[in-house]
Image: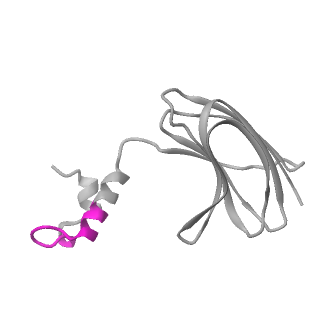
Amino acid sequence: MIDARVADAFPARHLRRGMPSAAQRCLLVVVLLSFAPFACAQVIDIAWDSDGKFRREMRAEPGKFVELCGKLSPGTKVQWRFESDAATNFNVHYHEGKDVRFPVKEDGVRSSKGTLDVRSEHDYCWMWSNKGSAPTAIAVEMAKGP
């Protein structure tokens, strides 16, 4: 039996009689996944203090990810560092149309630091993926300046 939410989101009139096309099957998978009973991410807005600093302690659940995101303008530099109690896959990324750009990408790290030199205005995200079987504590410090 199809869940009523799925039926409303994907009415039968969109399917031809017989086997649905590849595009229709793909759309159906997307719709079904959108109702999956799990949360994939914790997305946190970066709230800079009056000194241009941001600190946060977070927890990434097993198989999930957590990310810190905020809009940055060209000419801005962000010094960042983090430590976690287990290895994570870490990246700094932004979206450019359908493409995702990764100024930083590191797998299996417990700590890292660097400086992001912003060259174009975007929402930038610092993201940690927990591929382990236990929650992971992450402590982050960031400082923004020209």
Q: Nearer the viewer, residue 86 or 17?
A: 86
Query: Among all residues in the image, which is located at the extreme left?
Result: 18
Magenta stretch: includes residue 42: no
Give whichever of 107, 17 is nearer the camera. 107
Q: Quadrant of residue 8?
A: bottom left
Q: Which stretch did the figure color magenta?
A: 13-28
Relative to 136, is 51 above or below?
Answer: below
| Residue 104 placement (x, y as % from top left) | 68, 53
Query: Residue 26 location in percent, x, y?
Result: 30, 64
Q: Position of residue 42 (x, y in %)?
A: 56, 44
Query: Residue 98 at what x, y percent from top left?
Result: 53, 69
Q: Nearer the viewer, residue 11 or 116?
A: 116
Q: Is residue 24 magenta?
A: yes
Residue drawn at x 67%, y 61% as measured from the top left: 123
- 56 vs 98: above or below: above
Viewed as shown, does residue 70 lie left or right of 79? left
Exactly how many numbered labels are in the figure? 0
Q: How is the image coloured?
A: one colour
Q: Quadrant of the C terminus?
A: bottom right
Give the residue at x 50% y 40%.
64
* Residue at 47%, 37% in the rendered image: 63
Instruction: Look at the picture and state if 29 lies above or below 42.
Output: below
Left or right: residue 2 versus residue 35 is left
Q: Quadrant of residue 111?
A: top right
